[in-house]
Image (tube, rainbow, N blue to C red):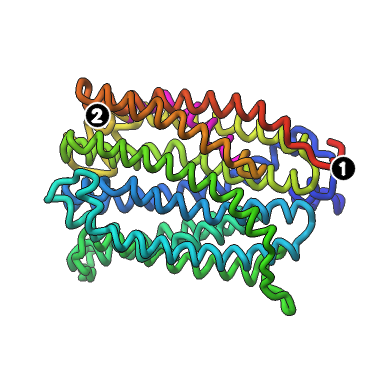
Amino acid sequence: MTKATKKPLLERMRDGEELSLSLQTAMIFELSVPAILAQLSSLIMQYIDASMVGRIGGNASASIGLISSSTWLFGGLSIAAATGFTVQIAKKIGAKDEKGARNLVREGLVCVLLFAAVLTAVGASISSKLPLWLHGGEELAKDASVYFLVFALSLPFVVLNYAAAGMLQCSGNMKVPGILEIIMCALDVIFNALLIFPARKLSVLGRTFTLPGADLGVTGAALGTALAQAVTVVLLLYFLLVRSKELHLRRGEKLRWVKKDIREAIRIGVPVAVEQTITCGAYIAFTRIVSPLGALALAANSFAITAESLCYMPGYGIGASATTIVGQCIGAKRSRLARRLGFMTTLVGILVMTVTGGLMFMFSPFMMSLLTPDKAIRTLGAHILRIEAFAEPMYGASIVAAGVFRGAGDTAVSSVLNFISMWTVRIPLAAILAPVYGLSGIWTAMCIELCVRGILFLVLLSIRSRKWNCEQEQGD
């Protein structure tokens, strides 16, 4: 084996080497598989939370489902803050400007922490009123409020998690964030077991022992997740700032505030924030349409959303790899290769989510049985999951294409497309169908909207990617 063939494929791309179709495909899978595993571990953590809380009772599950769209909104804004810097880091590394990339790491971490402080203050201030704004009943309001307050106070860990993991991924290191996501999942199991339930006796191999428990219920679920994230963030920062080949801190290099970097972070991040606000605002409106249907519908809706994650989380993993690949290609002045790989990763996303959608259709009753012992919730949840299964291929197209756009720094297009599809298709159609068909009608509206969204993303990807021209572009 020659020295050249030992080099990582991303490095060979940055060096201007020609990559065959098989090598391009290998690069996509080399980066996608660890990212998919990271997303799946995150999904498992959601399953664990939902399953453990589901053992408490239907109202506990419904209280978390009530404010889940709001936690997504704050999480989405956290992603936006991180994206403004991670995309630039990918381009700097593609251009072999590692010193500039390291300075972006410093700028980015400081900026996202300041942003997290603002989000925490806002979240804590609205936590007591939020369940009532979402039309939740009195029986849900207390648990929902406390859960959201704990989530708001943990936002610095959430933001740093997205930022540090994204920076490592955009440097080409997908494995470490993936492994640490799995560790976070395991920690979440341990902390939840200790915090949600009361002390209880367990028998293992004929021996009985007492497992301690704080008996905090829904609050314990929020605290368990926050603690797992805090531990994981410490490890992520260690690998980013100490162990990363390209990005670890060097002596003599100090933080420099570069106005161009900040302006570019705002240019990239603001459309992502708008996109997340539009999407999560639509989810909140969606929740308000579901809420009048009662606790059964709220719980089934919440569990079904968690179960559906099994299908679309692989898409987000492939989308993360697309951001890295396209960003580094454009940084290396190889925009034609960026366009080709953008379409290839999108096709991979469609194929993977076609398979996962088929599996969800077949195994939806089993998936719901893992989340709740309530037969009525399981039956309704399995029914709406089978409706949603038909949307997964085009949902995959939109998820991965959005990752491609982020890598190119072309984030505004996702905001526009999400606004059009969510607010002109999903919400009006759900409002029309809900009174007649209940939760099934609402999820039918979601299925139709996701198909429309995927088609729009594919059309815009074909049009916009032709404009990714780099000066002095290397031949492909």
Mark 1 residue element: loop
The answer to whether 192 is drawn above or below residue 330 in the figure is below
Residue 3's x, y, as percent? 86, 54
Q: Residue at x 62, y 70 (%)?
A: 241
Q: Left or right: where does residue 181 sit relative to residue 198?
A: right
Residue 448 quadrant: top left
Where residue 287 sits: x, y (%)?
28, 39
Most extreme residue toward the bottom is 252
- Crowd around label 2: few <14 · some 14–19 · many ≥20 (10 Å): many
Q: How many marks?
A: 2
Q: Residue at x 79, y 47 (%)?
A: 332
x, y percent for residue 296: 17, 37
The residue sitting at 54% across, 30% down in the picture is: 397
Q: Are marks 1 and 2 in contact (CB under 8 Å)?
A: no
Kindly identify which residue carries mark 1.
472
**Mark on residue 328?**
none
Neighbour tally class for label 1: few under 14, some 14-19, many 20 plus, Cα within 10 Å: few
What residue span does the magenta drawing correspond to? 385-404
Q: Residue at x 22, y 31 (%)?
A: 379
Instruction: Please check the rendered image and state whether residue 388 is part of the magenta-colored stretch, yes or no.
Output: yes
Circle 1: residue type? Gln
Foreground label between 1 and 2: 1
The residue tagged 2 is: 439
Q: Is residue 204 visible?
A: no
Of the image marks 1 and 2, the number of the one nearer the N terminus: 2
- In three-dimensional space, the C-alpha distance between marks 1 and 2, rounded to whole angstroms, equals 55 Å
